[in-house]
Amino acid sequence: MQHFIVEIIYKADISVIDKLRPAHREFLDEGYKKGIILMSGPQVPRTGGIIIARAESMEKLAEFLDDDPYQVNKAAEYQYIQFDPRNHQNFLKEWVEG
C-alpha cells in the first residue's frame, strides 16, 4: 500500500461547501469502511481539509476521490502528497502495514 496526505482546497464559497458537507462526509464514510481513509477533517481556518489515506496507487486513490461531492460539484480541488511512514504509533501498525 502507498500512503498519502490529501489536501482539499475549497474553490467555492463556504456556503456551497456547507451545503455539500453532509454528502461529502457520507462519501468519506465509504472510504473509512473500505480501509482507505485513516482520518480526515477541516483545516483551521476553514480553507479546505486534510485526508490521511492509503491505496494501491495515487491513481486508485484519485479515482476513488473523484466521486466526492466536493469534486463532482467543482467546489474543491485535491492535491496529493505521497509519503513513506517510517515511524508511527504502535496502534497504527495494522493500518500502515495493511
Image (cartoon, rainbow, N blue to C red):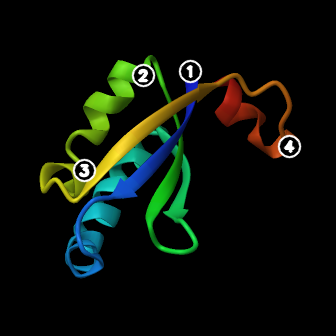
Residue 55 left/right relative to 93: left
Q: Say what amino acid the circle numbered 1 marks.
A: Gln
Q: Is 17 located above or below residue 41 in the figure? A: below
Residue at mark 3: 68
Taking the spot 27% from the left edge, 59% from the top edge, the residue there is: 11
Q: Classify mark 2: residues with Cα within 10 Å, few (<14), some (14-19) or many (20+).
A: some
Taking the spot 48% from the left edge, 47% from the top edge, the residue there is: 7
Residue 15 left/right relative to 30: left
- Whole-number angstrom distance, CA of label 3 to CA of label 4: 29 Å
Residue 11 left/right relative to 41: left
Q: Say what amino acid the circle numbered 2 marks.
A: Met
Q: Say what amino acid the circle numbered 3 marks.
A: Asp
Residue 58 position, x and y percent, is 42, 22
Q: Secondary structure at mark 1?
A: strand
Q: Is 8 located above or below residue 18 in the figure? A: above
Q: Classify mark 3: residues with Cα within 10 Å, few (<14), some (14-19) or many (20+).
A: many
Residue at mark 2: 58
Q: Earlier in the sequence, mark 3 or mark 4?
A: 3
Label pair 2/1, CB-CB below 8 angstroms: yes
Residue at mark 1: 2
Q: Secondary structure at mark 4?
A: loop
- Whole-number angstrom distance, CA of label 4 to CA of label 2: 24 Å
Q: Say what amino acid the circle numbered 4 marks.
A: Gln
- Whole-number angstrom distance, CA of label 2 to CA of label 3: 16 Å
Name the one closer to the observer, 89 or 71: 71
Q: Quadrant of residue 52?
A: top right
Name the one closer to the observer, 28 or 69: 69
Q: Secondary structure at mark 3?
A: loop
Taking the spot 30% from the left edge, 40% from the top edge, the residue there is: 65
* Tag shown at residue 19: none
Please tell me whether mark 4 or mark 2 is closer to you in this view.
2
Q: Earlier in the sequence, mark 2 or mark 1?
A: 1
